[in-house]
Image: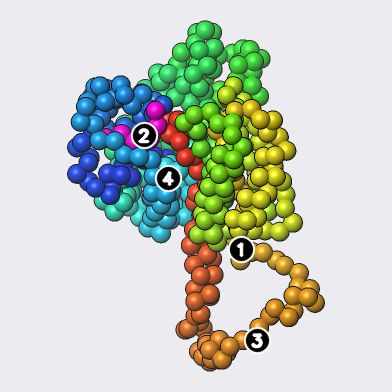
Amino acid sequence: MKVIFHIDMNSFFASCHQALDPQWEATPLVVSSPSRRAIVTTANYAARKLGINSPMPLYKAKEIYPQLKIVNPDFELYVEFAQKLFDFISSHYTNQIEVASIDECYIDVTNIYLKYGTAMQLAIDMQQNVFQQLGLPNSIGISYNKSLAKIASDLKKPMGITLIRPEDIPHLVDPLPVNKLFGIGKQTTERLNALGIMTIKDLAEFSDLPLLETILGKPAISFVERAKGGGSDKLLFEHNKLKQIGNETTLEYDLGDFEEIKNKIYLLSKHVSQRAQKRTMVGNVVYVTLKNTNRKRFTKQQTIPKYTNLLDDIYSTAISLFDQFWMGQPIRLIGVGLRGIISKYDIKEQISFDSLSNFQSESSTVKLIKEINKKYRKDILLTGQKLVELKYVLQAQTKYIQADQRILDETKLRSKDNE
């Protein structure tokens, strides 16, 4: 039987800001933008004790506590802390990690927990080290599959650790509301409740599978299996691969002026280009997405002949795409992104006769470095370029970030208030 951890950061966005200035931990603090439609994206636990939660309008939060500390969203900071978190676990414990989101992951500790005596002792060690070294409070769930581990991590917050063994299911899992199963949202919960399915046990014992399929769809069997304590214990490492780099923003006012929209597209393209270059990533698919005043989203993409991260390539393609499907209607949201992401060091380019003239002979410095390394049969000296490549191979900056879609307005962020 495997031992699976689910580690979930508590009030992650707020915790990142508190990690920079620990004195804010005792101060009611929220993450929110200064927009006129601002909502509370995340509230720290000091604010929650006062009744301030997401997605409460910011003006209401300030009515509850006028001295409320308000910090703007800082997405570079959140990605940075996420990378620190996953790298810390990988380097100090195990690289058997499946990233579930920017602030949570599953960890297979089957082969390492005995070094710490018990799984609980390992969880205590991991929780305290993540908090002390990174400043991130966290909760850990322990079980024999991912579904139960996730349920367990949600039972005690903040800084809780919960173990669910097979014999614990009747008193820890069965009585929980059915929406504690991952994937069952508000509307589905209401429909299940209408059938008398209020708890996880009720779902496990419900016998009319065809009726459940009308509510839960094809995964109905999977939901019932998980309600009975089953579920996968296999980590999906492909979830850790970077799939796209994108930026989108919800506009404070509906925008219909083409020149203003072009400026927005330019700025978004610039962000995408800068972030791709920083990560040494390139892509060959550019996409544009927009949402009109009816909140209907439109997305169009184009494959380009070469892999790139250059601003001119991204912006010119994005403008062309936008021209193709914008009909002059006011828009509420605009986004630009790059897909087909790979490292620039993984590009395999065919060398043509025309390109041969661009190749330069090796410098005397490079030749000397190669001679020394050959003599000692290992890389004693490295060029600056080689160091950059080595950094990519060993660190792969984005290796644990499941997605890199950056949303530049708090109204579009996933609610973090249940952390």
In the image, taking residue 404 as reference, residue 116 lies left or right, namely: left
- Find out whether the residues at labels 4 and 3 contact each other: C-beta distance under 8 Å: no
Q: Which amino acid, mark 3?
A: Ser
Q: Give the residue number, with chain letter if any, for mark 3.
A: 361
Q: Residues within 10 Å of mark 1 (few under 14, many from 20)?
A: some
- Frontmost of labels 3 and 2 is 2
Q: Give the residue number, with chain letter if any, for mark 2.
A: 34
In the image, taking residue 240 as reference, residue 18 lies left or right, namely: left
* C-alpha separation, residue under disc 3 versus residue under disc 2: 55 Å
Label 3 vs 2, first from the N-terminus:
2
Q: Quadrant of the C terminus?
A: top left
Label 4 vs 3, first from the N-terminus:
4
Label 3 vs 1, first from the N-terminus:
1
Residue at disc 2, secondary structure:
loop
- Frontmost of labels 4 and 2 is 2
- Residue placed at 41% from the left, 26% from the top? 37
Q: Which amino acid, mark 1?
A: Lys
Q: Give the residue number, with chain letter if any, for mark 1.
A: 344
In the image, taking residue 333 as reference, residue 23 lies left or right, namely: left
Residue at disc 3, secondary structure:
loop
* C-alpha separation, residue under disc 4 versus residue under disc 3: 43 Å
Whether 87 is among the magenta residues is: no
Label 1 vs 4, first from the N-terminus:
4
- Find out whether the residues at labels 2 and 1 contact each other: C-beta distance under 8 Å: no
Q: Give the residue number, with chain letter if any, for mark 4.
A: 75
Residue 345, image x, y percentages: 61, 66
Q: Residues within 10 Å of mark 3 (few under 14, many from 20)?
A: few
Q: Do we see residue 235 in this rendering?
A: no
